[in-house]
Image (cartoon, coloured by chain):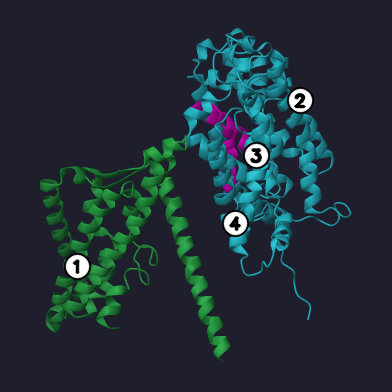
Chain colours: A cyan, B green
Amino acid sequence: MEKFLVSKGPYLRSADENKRTTSKIMLDVCIALLPVILLTIYKNVIKVFISGTYTSVYQALYPLLLIIIGPIFSILLELLCLFIIHKEEINNFKDLINIEKTEFGGLPGLFFVLTCPPYTPLWIVLIGIAVGEVVGKMLFGGFGQNIFNPALVGRAFIAFTFSNYLGASYLSPLEASIDAYAGATPLTFYSKLDIANITYDNMVSPYGGLLNFFLGMTPGALGETSALAILIGGIYLAIKRVIDYRIPLVYIGVVFITTFFIGLKVDGGIWYPTYMILSGGLFFGAFFMATEPVTSPKTPLARVIFAAFLGVLTVLFRIIGNMPEGVATAIVTMNIFGLAINQYVIKLRISGKLEKRFIPGMVVMIVLFITLFTYTIVFALN
Amino acid sequence: MTRKENFLKGFFKENPLFVLLLGCCPALAITTSVENAIGMTIAFTFVVTLSNLFISLINLNEKIREFIRPIRIAVYIVIIATLVTIVEMVMEAYLPELYNSLGVFISLITVNCIVLGRAEAYASKNKPLDSIIDGITMGLGYGLALLIISFIREFLGSGTITIWKELKIDLTGLYKALNIEPISFFKSSAGAFLVLGIVLGILQAIKNRKARKTKEKRVVKE
């Protein structure tokens, strides 16, 4: 008798391309991360070395150390978890490695480190990886079963628990020597400003123009600063069809539109929404986190809805929340609703036409979106 | 069920919090320190034991039992509320600090589902002595669960273990030696959910393993 094979998601359609396996997708993600990692090494290590402002070699190499330790620690933790889970089936170390090969344990650790400030104390990084890896991934059943993005679970955990440490570990010795930098990151500074004080001179000039934001020469977390490097990686992934271009496009677009309306009150300049999409972890979140195949919706329409809500929530959290950045919180929040949106869209698609039973859900989503949108703008302007 | 079995069931086999998942609300709210857990255990055991006794006594008489049948929940609540009021007043008079830190959760013992559940499910059908034993084991079992959760939460959240007022084990030195800080997340209620979930998961894993082993043994015998 033949048996049905039930395997873990994310699933691939065989029509997509020949011989595309999950490991190839993950390899593509690693390739796409390369420009981000190279640029962050240039910005946080090489530039500091050239300027000579470091006090010890350890301090100068610290960001590189984090990028190396993150994935390794994550894999080790996952091996431990897998050993506990599959104790009966494992006879020797080789079996364990074979299971680990389908779990891709290094990626959550790498992503987590890239969302951390460059000088985060090592123990905070380790705690964050442990929470993300064990609570966010393995307790749900491992790769393909997790509801939340593991890296962001860890990031949200340390952001809420050790916010004072994180705020102090953004600036490299080179950046700390520049007097013009008023806050830890552009967004930290922005969150302390009144709406009346928001001007181009105040917010962008200290960092030397918007081009610096695009290139990533502003203080910020390891992987998030350079929109250029992320764009290169993201476009590569989109061409390879690993990620859906709709999510980043809609996500960044909605953030741009929302902040454009807020910007009308400021001085109407296009610089304000550009500043808002280029600062913080928006690009990194949009291209690498919100598109994660396991936790994001699978149908195109559901992805658009998902990304639109992400955009509004991100601006909302940035403006109202007591933390300067809102991307991580917004993505974790929307991961909860991703499955529901996906189910709704699938039913809609099967039915083929707009039946009566779909109207309540649609009304709820539209009303919720408009409410959040207007609330964000009204709150920001007062 | 012998008396000994009856006494032992509350700790692991029928633990109110870990197995029946009753009384989650105070378990999540007051377990920020071991001291709170101990205070809650004492108050709770007192209430559940005596309420079991009185309810069992009421139900001994066939006539009264039939008479109060339609309104029995209200009668039970009156008895429990009386006991809780006693505990609350005594605690406010003699242990004001503990009273303040436990706050509203002392009064909420009244509507705690364990107390009412034991009254309805056990005390109303059993003899007074058995009911007392059941009350004690439920109270202590719940206390054990609270102790485990509060121990983990206080150790990770603030780095101390407060046993009673001044009697305190200070482990912040350990944190300092490692050059780290306690994780304040575990002081919040979200941390309580996480700890409760993980403890439940570990206990379930142990139970599953035991069940599998006994099954294997049976297979081997056959």
**Residue A367 visible within the image:** no
Q: Are marks 2 and 3 on the same chain?
A: yes
Q: CA distance from mark 4 to mark 3?
A: 18 Å
Amino acid at pointer 3: Ile
Q: Main secondary structure of the magenta part?
A: helix
Q: CA distance from mark 2 to mark 4?
A: 37 Å
Q: Earlier in the sequence, mark 2 or mark 3?
A: 3
Q: CA distance from mark 2 to mark 3?
A: 25 Å
Q: Which label is found at residue A69?
A: 3
Badge 3: residue crowd in 10 Å (few <14, some 14–19, many ≥20): some
Magenta range: A310-336
Instruction: Please give the chain letter of the residue carrying mark 3.
Output: A
Asked whether disc 2 touches disc 3, contact meaning CB atoms under 8 Å apart, the reply is no
Residue holding disc 4: A81
Instruction: Please give the chain letter of the residue carrying mark 2.
Output: A
Q: Which label is found at residue B49?
A: 1
Residue holding disc 2: A228
